[in-house]
Image (tube, rainbow, N blue to C red):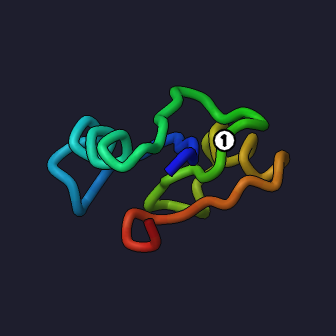
Amino acid sequence: DGQTFVITGSVNHFKNRNELKAYIEDRGGKVAGSVSSNTSYLINNDATSASSKNKKAKSLNIPIITEEEF
């Protein structure tokens, strides 16, 4: 509740990103399109990815978690 998530990469446990987004929002969370200092967690099943979102999250010390960890 009150946490902000950014979703990147493919999803495995949900049908698609929209289903994961709805799951988060139904529980009082927010989903943003880009990583910022307001982001609580970046959800990415490939935490070792060299994507720009991963790099930004690491530079801001934002935890990168997988769907399973979520």
Please state which amino acid type lies under the numbered disc 1: Thr
Please name the residue shown 48% across and 54% down the image: 44
In x, y percent, where is residue 36? 72, 33
Residue lying farthest left? 15
**Label 1 sits on residue:** 39
Residue 22 falls left or right of residue 30: left
- Which picture quadrant has residue 17? top left
- Which picture quadrant has residue 65? bottom right
Question: Is 41 located above or below residue 8 in the figure?
Answer: below
Please name the residue shown 47% across and 35% down the image: 31
Residue lying farthest bottom? 69
Asked whether the viewer can see residue 35, the reply is yes
In x, y percent, where is residue 32? 52, 30
Q: Between 38 and 58, which is closer to the camera in this rendering?
A: 38
In x, y percent, where is residue 67? 39, 63
Crowding at mark 1 (Cα within 10 Å: few <14, some 14-19, many 20+): some
Asked whether the viewer can see residue 8, the reply is no
Please name the residue shown 58% across and 54% down the image: 49
